[in-house]
Amino acid sequence: MSTADTTELVDYDEAVDRYDPVLGIEVHVELGTDTKMFDGAPNVFAAEPNTAITPVSLGLPGTLPVVNGTAIEYAIKIGLALNCQIAETCRFSRKQYFYPDLTKNFQTSQYDEPIAFDGWIDVELEDGETVRVQIERAHMEEDAGKNTHLGGAAGRIQGATRSLVDYNRAGVPLVEIVTRPIEGVGERAPEVAAAYVRTLRDIFRTLEVSEARMERGNVRADINVSLRPEPESPLGTRTETKNVNSFRSIERTVRFEISRQAGILDAGGTVIQETRHFHEDTGHTSSGRVKSDAEDYRYFPEPDLVPVAPSREWVEEIRATLPELPAARRRRLIGEWGFTDLEMRDVINAGALDLIESTVAAGTSAQAARKWWMGELARTAKEQDLELEQLAVTPGQIAELQGLVDGKKINDKIAKQVLGKVLEAKGDPATIVESEGLAVVSDDSVLTGAVDQAIADNPEVVEKIRGGKVQAIGALIGPIMKATRGQADAGRVREIIMERLGVS
């Protein structure tokens, strides 16, 4: 363990008050191709260990790689979405150090000639502020396999007695996106880091180049953090926390590293350039290995692969097929739906945008869809510790439910009851209303009897109404709703009361 691991932490607010944090983020996205980057092995998740492989996957003698054309197309799509220039020619290189999870002992990657470079992306924070992140490069490479460490307490190599290797993931196509230093974000550094990766995740999904499921490792972020005394000072020594795969963990990583590095600098120490590991249970990072510089990897051009030279015509064809990207889509929907900026940010932060759009497409208004997803359903999801999209209800069912309300078949109170039964998988809203007799009662013969009973039971209220206090009608409607199990048509009840009491 390095001395940095025992350094006393500095309070985060104090740390960002005295030091200027600078970020650098490397995001790896696994591409959703049918086969791997350089061979015909299937690109699948959770197969039996060491079954999704070929001799090429294992780097056996005499095998030769062939580039996956779809992976190149996906990489170009990502580059274009990030406002990058697309290289007229680029090549693969061998990146060499000891890889127990890549049997050929090098990674086929891109070094000095990436497929895409010099881009940028605007990242919107929760309060609406926008931060532009400059993209240095987006390059293609292959993923490594997966090591499982056994015999230790934490499932990590430290303390393990043996390790198993699954080569199924070895060779899965990756695109790595590398930022230039992200400066000037100050105390908002953790929020900016998480928002940036979230923005990329949304773009990957929109482009349909990856499932982008962080819990599966489809998207992983290496978080570089450094501190300097002043914004005008040279960049400080950075650490790189590897393979952080949730937005919350990204924020916690940045906060911890800022506090830890501030403690080292306050004590007169020197930050070590190293890789580190994030620990979900404690929110801390720990030392991995001293960070290698590019020359330490002994890159050289991959002799078994020819350069990739996408024609300008093909690049423009791909550009023409790009879907509407998330930022443009949000701007369009704000205009179409009439949401305020704050309402839209709340919707996005809740993960409800797709659900609301699908509910609107199923036939209801945007405001009604927002009411359900951001109200009753958001509360239910929170109570059950689920994401909104994990709830057992579809946008079509919500649109059907609101349609019953709009058609005055049920009222809002009954609608909430019906929604509860939908979530219990008891059927669609209309079926539930019919089978359980939950439709609003609008039959005058039934309502008149209930009104007459309420009038007889509440003479003081009747006197107030006849005396001109029409708002007192609410005191009569309550008992009537109770008598009809909340199913009375409140509007019609009010009309009957006024008719019976001769009030205009």
Image (tube, rainbow, N blue to C red):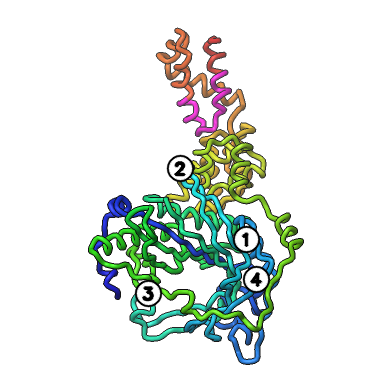
Give the Cα distance between marks 2 and 3. 36 Å
Give the Cα distance between marks 3 and 1. 31 Å
Q: Are marks 3 and 4 in contact (CB under 8 Å)?
A: no
Residue located beneath label 1 in the image: 79
Q: Residues within 10 Å of mark 2 (few under 14, many from 20)?
A: few
Q: Quadrant of the C terminus?
A: top right
At a point 64% along the width and 33% down the height, the residue shown is 407
- Residue 449 place in picture, x, y as percent: 54, 22
Q: Secondary structure at mark 4?
A: loop
Q: Earlier in the sequence, mark 2 or mark 3?
A: 2
Residue located beneath label 4 in the image: 90
At a point 53% along the width and 10% down the height, the residue shown is 503
State whether residue 67 appears in this view.
Answer: yes
State whether residue 45 appears in this view.
Answer: no
Q: Secondary structure at mark 2?
A: loop
- Residue 359 place in picture, x, y as percent: 62, 44
Q: Nearer the viewer, residue 441 or 290?
A: 290
At a point 56% along the width and 64% down the height, the residue shown is 137
Give the Cα distance between marks 2 and 4. 40 Å
Q: Amino acid at mark 1?
A: Gly
- Which of discs 2 and 4 lies nearer the camera? The answer is 4
- Which of discs 1 and 4 lies nearer the camera? The answer is 4
Residue located beneath label 3 in the image: 288
**Which quadrant holds residue 44?**
bottom right
Q: Are marks 2 and 3 in contact (CB under 8 Å)?
A: no
Residue located beneath label 2 in the image: 127
- Read off the magenta span: 478-495
Q: Amino acid at mark 4?
A: Cys
